[in-house]
Amino acid sequence: MMLAELDNNSNLPAGIYYFINIMRDAFVKNQVRRYRQLQGRDNRKIIGTYCITVPEELIYAAGAIPVRLCGGSYEASCIGDELVPRDTCPVVKASVGFTSLNPISLYQMCDAVIVSTTCDAKRKLGEELSNYTEVWMLEVPHIKDTDGSRRQWIQQLYTLKKNIEKLTGRKFIGRRIRRKALEDSIGIINRARYQARRLYEIRKSPAPVILGREAMLAINAYSYDIAFEWTRAMSELNDELEALYHKGQFVCSEYTPRILIAGSPMIFPNWKIPSLIEEMGAVIVTDETCMGNRYLYDPIGTTEKSVKDMMVGIAARYLMPCVCPSFTPNEDRLYRLLQMAEEFNIDGIIYHVLKGCVVYDFELIRVEKIMKEKNIPVLRIETDYNPEDIEQLRTRIEAFIEIINSKKRKMKEA
Amino acid sequence: MTVSQIRWITLTVSFFVLSFGGLAALSLGNFLPTFSCFYVESRSGTCFLWVLQHLLDHGYWEAYKSLGKYLLYFSLLVIVIGRAWCGWICPLGFFQDVLDLIRRKLHLGYISFPEELRAQLSCVKWIFLFIALLIPLWVSFPFFGKSIAMDLRQPFCQLCPGKYILPFILGDTVDVAVNFKSTTTIIMSVLGLIFSGVVIFGALLKRRFWCPYCPMGLFLSFYKKISFIKLKKDCQKCTMCGICYNVCPMEIKDLLTERKNEDVTFTDCTLCLRCVEYCPEDETLRATFFGRTIYKSSSKGFFSRQHITSGFPEEKHQVVSEPYQ
Ligand code: SF4
Ligand code: SF4
Ligand code: SF4
Ligand code: SF4
Ligand code: SF4
């Protein structure tokens, strides 16, 4: 449904079709040919991941392929409804739903999945999934900056590394994740991040050259693609967008209200909020969700090529800059939001809370407080994957955007 | 050229100039804020710590007066570039960095001490500094233990790894031995040799192993508030990615956790600027000279130094053969 809507927009940049096709193959056509091919022909393992705190470098370095499985489908969440408590968040419901019934191959094909112990629901998710597949839990410390948690986290990654090696290793050969492989995989994903950052920069332009729902979809597609291929496609898209910018072909004017989406992850196909916002005449210039900008923003920096140093670098990257509210204290997120509001010249924030996602809801008050000082309105939207509330959401979003519009008009006159 | 490369060049040139400059009759004075060791015959300038201990233990006015003069010159040198003397000039720093380079080339990891241990060890540099300041005063007024006191001249130098390591690597092994003159000298030189062994071994395992305990470094850090060079951080732009902490050879964590003050020139900082080079956020870390930015971090720089801003990894990483459509 969402894809058809996107497709119908005749102004789409050509580069975006690649990403739309990834989504279509994964969720509509239920086609995972590339992965199957890799699994069958090249004997590669596929490892599912359930959070951005799972280091994909380790997976690539072992010759395996990661796919990010956090579920965003309404149908799957309905299946999951039967299996987990009612108040669980829809991400976990959909993930359990997908795994239990195996309706799509994306979930079926995984040889093992990695679940991080971030929020309560994710912690229990791992336990539930272990009924169906091999699960490795990854214990994420909740207080980030103590020496103890740093050490514990590095230790966890070494354990994970061992698990992956056990899965991918063949007898006698290729048992270990080698130094060179690790170095390469860091390079590969840093390349992807570099392209993601280019898109991030492009979206800062006063008049946008790409709509937020498309840009977010492109980033989201990374979950279901192979990093290398994604990077290539993203670099083409970026080149195209830069050209559009120089030609002055904007998708909307610089007076269009600029929205930042914050809060619980928005995972395809749950695309209703991005679509609504942009249908109502605003533009999403950036987001701070873990399926969007946060996913590929921070790079890994290492000064030497020893396994030890690279592991330290990977550990830091996947823990320190992550501002998921399952961490505490989480002041860093407020700094991040303020910085984004400034960089992107934000007019309003839509704060997305998935029903049952307590941690994001908790931080709303703080976010509202700091944004009030900056005179940026915040609209909290609590919803799940059910499409029934679309009309109601539409009214609220419309009103919110209208307020911003009138404010902007006044400012323009003054 | 990256800052690291420029620093290597400066460090190497300084090492040779300071170690061999004397052969070309070059004389840079005896108030240098760096380990240009007195015990290196061919040096072109002398470590201020030696002069300090030497003049303090004289106990008469003229010596103190010239000490005051040297202290003034020393201070001026430190005020201008602060602890960049450590990161960019010091011969013992160079020696440690060379060992570090060897370790890296062998792809061996480094060790890092737990924070708690680091905090406990941070008193060591103070102890060394007190040894360098107080014992010479006792030597100059030896109201007890006169013979012991006289054998304790330049007490810190007798312990200093610089005294043993620097002449040794330049091929001069005369001082690299136990001094059997008296019990005191035996103890001091044995301790000094042990320290030197530990430093050599340590520097192969840990980045800038000795510098956190160096009294000279501590002395230089006293000037950090008035020094012209400063390290600055834009706390709002920082994403807490932790890279600066990981790459810092002095393992300064405050640099990462600082959320209030702009000035992040911490006591241990040797101004090597590696953190600035590796910070991936635009203008988040900066080095300033006289308030003017001389070097700043940038996202673009971060990625281009890894050669990933254009082109793609070689074919072997291309895991998929079939085009996607
Ligand atoms: S919201 Fe937090 S716990 Fe959930 S996937 Fe994102 S980062 Fe992980
Ligand atoms: S022994 Fe150490 S303190 Fe003494 S002059 Fe040499 S380097 Fe300086
Ligand atoms: S701390 Fe001491 S040994 Fe280290 S670079 Fe500075 S002066 Fe040299
Ligand atoms: S804080 Fe930066 S400049 Fe100072 S020692 Fe560490 S890496 Fe070098
Ligand atoms: S490297 Fe830069 S962005 Fe990262 S924690 Fe340090 S100062 Fe902040």
Image (cartoon, rainbow, N blue to C red):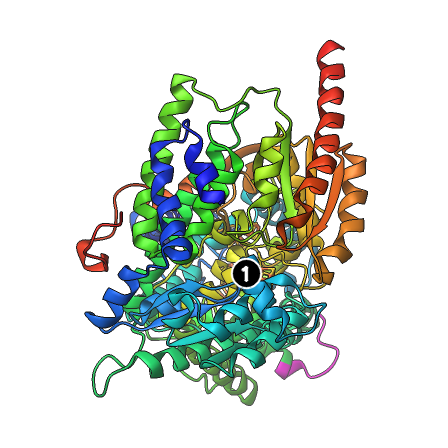
Residue at figure coordinates x 19%, y 59% from the top left: B316
Residue at figure coordinates x 41%, y 41% from the top left: B301
Residue at figure coordinates x 30%, y 53% from the top left: A228
Q: Is residue B142 magenta?
A: yes
Residue closer to the observer: A116 or A143: A116
In percent of width and height, residue B102 lies at 31, 68
In percent of width and height, residue B70 lies at 59, 48
- Is residue B6 in sight in this rendering? no
Q: Which residue is under mark 1?
A: A75
Relative to A341, A54 lies left or right:
left
Q: Residue furthest front?
A: A388
Q: Is residue A140 above or below residue A406?
A: below
Quadrant of the image occupied by residue A7: top left
Relative to A6, B122 lies left or right:
right
Residue closer to the observer: B269 or A91: A91
Relative to A5, A374 lies left or right:
right
Q: Quadrant of the C terminus of chain A?
A: top right
Residue closer to the observer: B213 or B311: B311
Q: Is residue B68 above or below residue A157?
A: above
The span shown in magenta is B141-148
Q: Main secondary structure of the magenta part?
A: loop
Q: Is residue B83 magenta?
A: no
Q: Residue furthest top?
A: A413
Residue at figure coordinates x 73%, y 26% from the top left: A402
Relative to A139, B173 lies left or right:
left
